[in-house]
Image: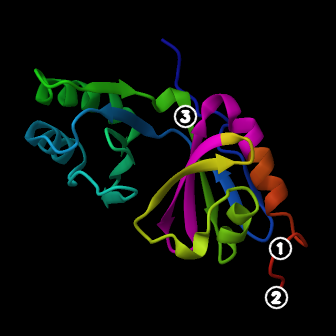
Amino acid sequence: MSKAVSALGGISYTGFAEVAEAGLQGMITVRGDLGSAKMKKAVKAATGTAVPAPRRIISSGDKSAAWMSPDELLLLVPYAGAAATVGALEKTLAGEHALVADVSDARAMFRIKGPKAQEALMKLCPVDFSSVAADEIRRTRAAQVAAAVWMSGQDEYSLVSFRSSAGYVMGLLEVSVRKGAELFPA
């Protein structure tokens, strides 16, 4: 069996903000009736959180549940526990019209850090970041590729894209944070 590796091996770049591929992250897509009792129980057991409201992400320790659409969640769990979490979700959701898929190896995650992290994303995503709440997740684009982005800490954003476009996204982020390229120079 081969060893799991992240899309870009944890590559990082520092300019007016720091961008880095975040490494291996367990990601599980769950589709179904988000209001059902079984779904609420399954999400609580898997992440320790409630089912989030539309466009929200809720975290509990190293696990999160993110609303992606009216019938879809993205659950973030430690990579090593993703397969077991999928099994537990499938067991809890048995008999329910639902889909559970481990998408950990099909996605890449990036962290954008620093007081001007928002500026880097403003160049790439058609989002008014000044109106994004701290617990809000946005499905959007990063230039020409699908992405989801949220504030994951103080002066920190997380961005998820397809693994197949990880190199392109890292290139975009690197160019976006080059010194001298700030939107609002000090």
Question: Label 1 amino acid?
Answer: Glu
User: In the image, residue 37 lies at what x, y percent?
Assistant: 8, 42
Residue 186, labelled with which disc? Answer: 2
- Provide the residue designation for mark 1: 182
Magenta stretch bounds: 146-169
Question: Going by the image, does 19 lie left or right of 33?
Answer: right
Numbered disc 3: secondary structure: strand
Q: Is residue 123 visible?
A: yes
Question: Going by the image, does 50 lie left or right of 134?
Answer: left
Q: Is residue 22 visible?
A: no
User: In the image, residue 10 lies at what x, y percent?
Assistant: 65, 44
Question: Label 3 amino acid?
Answer: Arg
Q: Quadrant of the C terminus?
A: bottom right
- Whole-angstrom CA distance, mark 3 to mark 2, is 35 Å
Question: Going by the image, does 163 lie left or right of 43?
Answer: right
Colour treatment of the image: rainbow
Question: Badge 3: how crowded within 10 Å, few (<14), some, or many (20+)?
Answer: many
The residue sitting at the right extreme is 180
Please report whichever mark, 3 or 2, sits nearer to the chain's N-terminal start. 3
User: In the image, residue 162 lies at what x, y percent?
Assistant: 60, 34
Q: Nearer the viewer, residue 166 or 1?
A: 166
Numbered disc 1: secondary structure: loop
Picture residue at 56% right of the left edge, 42% below the top: 23
- Whole-angstrom CA distance, mark 3 to mark 1, is 28 Å
Question: Badge 2: how crowded within 10 Å, few (<14), some, or many (20+)?
Answer: few
> Residue 35 lies in magenta, yes or no?
no
- Provide the residue designation for mark 3: 107
Picture residue at 46% right of the left edge, 57% below the top: 137
From what the image shows, is residue 66 above or below residue 89?
below
Picture residue at 29% right of the left edge, 57% below the top: 53
Q: Are marks 2 and 1 in contact (CB under 8 Å)?
A: yes
> Residue 152 lies in magenta, yes or no?
yes
